[in-house]
Image (cartoon, grey):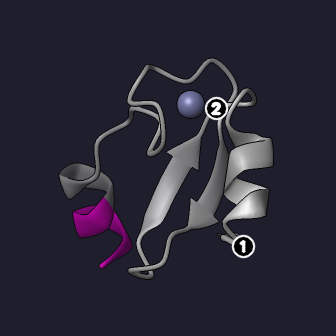
Amino acid sequence: MKLLTRIFRRKNCGICGKKPVNPSYYYNDKDEKIPVCFQCVPYAERRAYRKV
Ligand SMILES: [Zn+2]
């Protein structure tokens, strides 16, 4: 299943939609694993996304 999610997930930042340079991974409110670029990490933290 890990492979499937990797195929279906976009690599873009889950918040700003840009290609992240050095992404961290968070679970969003839908329990989806999303990459978050370093600029959006504070935003992810504010929204209480759980870090992977
Ligand atoms: Zn971003």
Q: Which mark is residue 27?
A: none
* Mark whose residue sits in front, 1 or 2: 1
The image quadrant that residue 46 belongs to is bottom right
How far apart are the alpha carbons under marks 1 and 2? 16 Å
Mark 2: which amino acid?
A: Cys
The image position of residue 37, as x and y in percent, is 64, 32
Look at the numbered disc 2 and say if its residue's Cβ is closer than 8 Å to ligand 1.
Answer: yes
Mark 1: which amino acid?
A: Ala
Q: Which mark is residue 48?
A: 1
Q: Magenta region: which residues? A: 1-5
Q: For residue 30: magenta?
A: no
The image quadrant that residue 21 belongs to is top right
Q: Along the polypeptide, which appears first: circle 1 or circle 2?
A: 2
Tell me: 36 left or right of 8: right
Which residue corresponds to the image point at 45% horizontal and 20% vertical from the top-left? Answer: 19
Which residue corresponds to the image point at 41% horizontal and 72% vertical from the top-left? Answer: 32
The image position of residue 33, as x and y in percent, is 47, 65
